[in-house]
Image (spheres, rainbow, N blue to C red):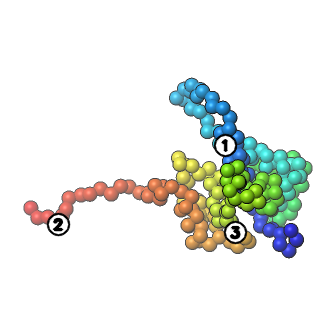
Amino acid sequence: MSLQTLDRTQWSFAEALAHVQTVTVARRAVEAAKLPPKPAPAYQTWNPPQDPAVAWKAEAETELLVALRDGDLLAQGRFTEERTHGWGHGGSSSGFGLHSGYHTSIRPEQWREGKYSFGRLTARDWEFIDIRVARFLVKAIWPDFIPEPMRSMQGAADAIYTTPYLDLMQAAIAHFGISPRNQGKKECLMDWFLEQQIEGEPVSNKLADAMATLIRLPSAQRGGAKRVLGPDLRQTG
């Protein structure tokens, strides 16, 4: 591949994590299906069995952070050393502000020194936000997973087709923890989509609205109180 044809598309950390989790869960599910069946353990009602996908997604996040700490995967972010709000008190507040408007490289030792949380890589004296990685680097380490039967049909060189729109929606699902029980508010999802870019272009309002709708269940779209039918006032006594 020449430099002129190199795909330089940047993924946010959430998009990269969503891809790694998708690949890891698919691979682990195939591995688990090949294992001999085990008797179902007895669980108390207050301690239901954990979905194995939860542990697999945590494993994927650990792998991604290890790759960044070891220098196998390179990332960029907006840097600051300005602590404008005092010391943070946990949660999404770090106390840092006035981040650079330009992205600079994050060194492996900075990943080892800092702690990544709520979209920020924070150390005692500095912080990176808006962290991005090159999509081709992520896929070089975690290529799209194709199960063996599908691979034999498509050929080993084929990849599962996807688009930047699908990748961004998967990233939103991972970022907000969307599930059948946790659908999130459409307005919050739209605000997040409007902050993203697809192939270097900002997401439009119409596209953000469509994607925020598609990642939620149809039942979640029907809000409000149920309609109550009253007497037909057109009837005369």
* Label 1: how many Cα within 10 Å (few below 14, some 14–19, many 20+): some
Among the 4 quarters of the image, the one containing residue 197 = bottom right
Q: Position of residue 110 (x, y in %)?
A: 88, 51
Q: Nearer the viewer, mark 3 or mark 1?
A: 1
Amino acid at dot 3: Ile
Amino acid at dot 2: Arg
Query: In the rendered image of this protein, does residue 28 appear above or below residue 208?
Result: above
- Evaluate if marks 3 and 1 touch, with contact meaning CB atoms under 8 Å apart: no
**C-alpha distance separating marks 3 and 1:** 30 Å
Disc 2 is placed on an element classified as loop
**Disc assigned to residue 198:** 3
Disc 3 is placed on an element classified as strand
Mark yes or no: residue 12 visible: no
Sequence order check, earlier mark of 2 and 1: 1
Which quadrant would the C terminus be assigned to in this image? bottom left
Query: In the rendered image of this protein, does residue 104 appear above or below residue 149?
Result: below
Q: Nearer the viewer, mark 2 or mark 3?
A: 3
Residue shown at the point (57%, 58%) measured from the top left: 215
In the picture of the structure, the residue carrying the numbered disc 2 is 234
Mark yes or no: residue 29 visible: yes
Q: Is residue 45 left or right of residue 100?
A: left
Query: In the rendered image of this protein, does residue 69 appear above or below residue 128?
Result: above
Q: Position of residue 38 (x, y in %)?
A: 63, 29
Amino acid at dot 1: Ala
Disc 1 is placed on an element classified as helix
Sequence order check, earlier mark of 3 and 1: 1
**C-alpha distance separating marks 2 and 1:** 61 Å
Residue shown at the point (90%, 50%) measured from the top left: 109
Q: Position of residue 63 (x, y in %)?
A: 79, 46
Q: Nearer the viewer, residue 234 or 10?
A: 10
In the picture of the structure, the residue carrying the numbered disc 1 is 29
